[in-house]
Image (spheres, rainbow, N blue to C red):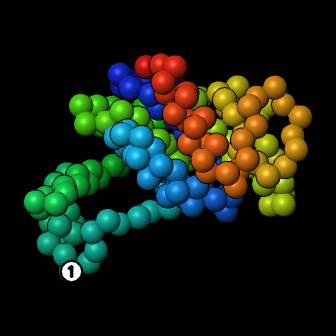
Amino acid sequence: MNNPLNLPVLGFAAYSGTGKTTLLTKLIPLLKSKGLRIGLIKHAHHQFEIDHPGKDSYVLRQAGAEQVLIASKHRWALITETKDLEEPHLETLLAQINTKTLDLVLVEGFKHEAFPKIELYRSSLGNPLIFPKDESVIAIATDEVISTHLPRLDINNIESIKQFVYNYIQKGHDH
C-alpha cells in the first residue's frame, strides 16, 4: 500500500474477538497524553449506519443524496454512499484524512492489506497467526510465548505498547 499521507499510519490487526477496540480505547488516551493528535480508521465487516431512521440526515440520504455532511459546533461527519460491492481499500480511505490536524493515524482491522501493523494474538481463541504470512506485521502483542524475530509486546501491558508505538513514530517510519 502506498501511504498518501505525510504522517505515520500504524494498524492493529487480529481476528474478531481478540480485543482490538478494547486495546485502542486504552492506548489512544495514553498517546494523546504524549501530545499526539490521533486519527483512526476502523473497518466494519457489516453494514452500519451513523445516522438513523427518522433523523434528517438519514431521510436526506435515503432521498438520494450521495454525500451528506452533518455539522454542529462540536463535530462534523461526512457520510458517503458507495455503490461498490467490494470492501474499501485502506489507501482510498487514508486519502480522506485531514493531515493538517493529525500526527498519527491508527487503523483497526484491514488485516489483509499490506501496511505496518501490530498483530494482536491470543492462542486461546484458536485462530492462526497473521504473521509470518503477512510481512507487514512489525510486532506481535500477545499473552503467549511465540517464536519470532519480531518484537513481542505484552498484550496486557498497555504502557509497553504505547512506548513501542511512540518510539516507532519518533523514528519516522512510514511517512
The C terminus appears in which quarter of the rendering?
Answer: top left
Residue visible at 80% across and 60% down?
Answer: 125
Please name the residue shown 40% across and 47% down the image: 33
- Where on the picture, by quarter, is residue 129? top right
Q: Is residue 75 something that shows in the picture? A: yes
- Measured along the vertical axis of the image, is residue 140 above or below residue 108? above
Is residue 37 toward the left or the right of residue 117 in the image? Answer: left
- Report the residue at 62% width, 43% height from top: 161
Residue 119 lies left or right of residue 169; in this view the side is right
Q: How many marks?
A: 1
Can residue 63 be seen in this snapshot? no
Label 1 CA crowd tier, 10 Å (few <14, some 14–19, many 20+) = few
- Residue 118 x, y percent position in the rendering: 64, 38
| Residue in the foreground of this view, choosing between 67 and 96 | 96
Res. 57 image quadrant: bottom left
Give the residue type that dot 1 points to.
Gly
Q: In the displayed image of the protein, which residue is found farthest to the left?
A: 73
- Against 92, residue 158 (above or below) is below
Secondary element at tag 1: loop
Left/right of residue 62 with respect to residue 127 in the rendered view: left
Q: Position of residue 160 (x, y in %)?
A: 64, 43
Which residue appears at 87% of the width and 40% of the height?
146
Read off the residue under disc 1. 54
Horizontal arrangement in the rendering, residue 55 relative to residue 82 (left or right):
left
Q: Please name whichever residue, 118 or 78, is drawn nearer the observer in this view of the structure.
A: 118
Q: Position of residue 97 (x, y in %)?
A: 30, 37
Q: Position of residue 99 (x, y in %)?
A: 28, 31
